[in-house]
Image (cartoon, rainbow, N blue to C red):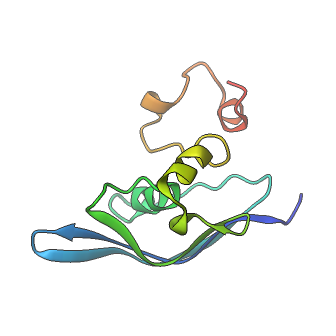
Amino acid sequence: MDSEVVLSVRNLETEFLTDSGPVQVLHGVSFDVKKGRTLGLVGESGCGKSVTSMSIMGLLPKPYGRIIGGEILYRGKNLAALPAQEMYAMRGDRISIIFQDPMTALKPSAHGRQTIDGSA
């Protein structure tokens, strides 16, 4: 298996603006994804899985959610610094996500590997 790192998340920090002021919800999240590998984020409800994923994909609700620190490097390109149109073009084509509710995102008759490989 190739050991090339295609996604590197380093010290990711994300906050949401509330009526009471900013609330930091991610504190220094870091991990790597190597070429040909699949990563699953698991944890208790409310621990930051979805916010981490939304941060990576550039899907934080604007203007309330924002990345305040760290890097999200996809093949050396910092996704957090990309213009919205360029990030839009990468989603689904180069980088994808399956959120927690698979019944709204997956084809029920497909096997998991088919879905991940895009052959479903």
Is residue 67 something that shows in the picture?
Answer: yes
Query: Residue lying furthest top in this view?
Result: 109
Q: Return the x and y of residue 21 as percentages of the image width and height.
A: 15, 76
- What is the x, y in percent for residue 5? 77, 67
Note whether 80 is above or below 59 in the view shown.
Answer: below
- Residue drawn where x is 46% and y is 63% of the image: 52
- Locate the N terminus and report the quarter of the image it occupies: bottom right
Q: Which residue reaches farthest right? A: 1
118 in relation to 69, above or below:
above
Q: Is residue 65 left or right of residue 32?
A: left
Give the x, y percent position of residue 68. 40, 77
| Location of residue 6 by image quarter | bottom right
Q: Is residue 96 visible?
A: no
Quarter of the view holding residue 15: bottom left
In front here: 73 or 2?
73
Q: Is residue 15 left or right of residue 5?
A: left
Query: Quarter-wise, where is residue 27 in the image?
Result: bottom left
Task: Judge whether 72 appears above or below 57 on screen.
Answer: below
**Which residue is rendered at x = 53% and y = 29% of the image?**
106
Q: Nearer the viewer, residue 87 or 102?
A: 87
Image quadrant occupied by the C terminus: top right
Q: Who's the residue at 39% across and 64% down the image?
A: 48
| Residue shown at the point (37%, 57%) measured from the top left | 60
* Residue 13 placement (x, y as % from top left): 42, 76
